Amino acid sequence: MKNIWECEGCQTPNGSMCTACCTVLEIPEFGKDAGTPCLHQHPGQGCDTLGQGLREARCGGYHCSQEQRRFVLFLLTGAAALNNEVTQKEMLTAQTSLEL
């Protein structure tokens, strides 16, 4: 399944793991608000082992390719750039393709 970077799964163009959804999504089970980094997030690597069980239950089913809200996709691209998982150019390319 292609993601917002046109890569498979959660890969970014440079081969790291995108964790933007770990910042953008709300996860009530952790008391995590939308727009704040998850305590179990490791930019470029994914979720740590402490969060794996909940990730599978809550976050594991989420994939940006299924996101219909363009503003959320815009936030995801920005979060990935802040996490140094994609370059500014890759972020702008993805955001431009969203045609907000």
Image (cartoon, rainbow, N blue to C red):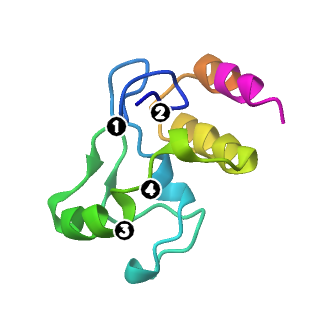
9 shown above or below 54: above
Q: Amino acid at mark 2?
A: Asn
Query: Amino acid under label 4?
Result: Cys
> Which residue carries the number 3 mark?
58
Query: Mark 4 falls on what kind of element?
Result: helix
Q: Earlier in the sequence, mark 1 or mark 3?
A: 1
> Picture coordinates of residue 20 (x, y %)?
49, 46
Mark nearer the viewer, 4 or 1: 4
- Judging by the rendered image, the residue that carries numbered circle 1 is 44
Dot 1, crowdedness within 10 Å: few (<14), some or many (≥20)?
A: many
Q: Residues within 10 Å of mark 4 (few under 14, many from 20)?
A: many
- Of circles 1 and 3, the one toward us is 3
Query: Residue 80's x, y, as percent?
Result: 52, 38
Q: Quadrant of the N terminus?
A: top left
Q: Amino acid at mark 3?
A: Arg
Mark 2: secondary structure: loop
**How dense is the environment of label 3, judged by Cα within 10 Å: few (below 14), some, or many (20 and up)?**
some
Rounded to the nearest angstrom, the CA distance separating label 1 from label 3 is: 20 Å
Write down the residue under mark 4.
Answer: 22
Instruction: Give left or right: position of 46 versus 20.
Output: left
Which corner quadrant of the image does residue 29 belong to? Answer: bottom left
Q: Are marks 2 and 4 in contact (CB under 8 Å)?
A: no
In the image, the segment drawn in magenta is 93-100
- Per the rendering, the mark at residue 84 is 2
Residue that sits furthest to the right in the current view: 100
- Foreground mark, 2 or 4, reads 4
* Real-space Cα separation, disc 2 to disc 3, in angstroms: 24 Å
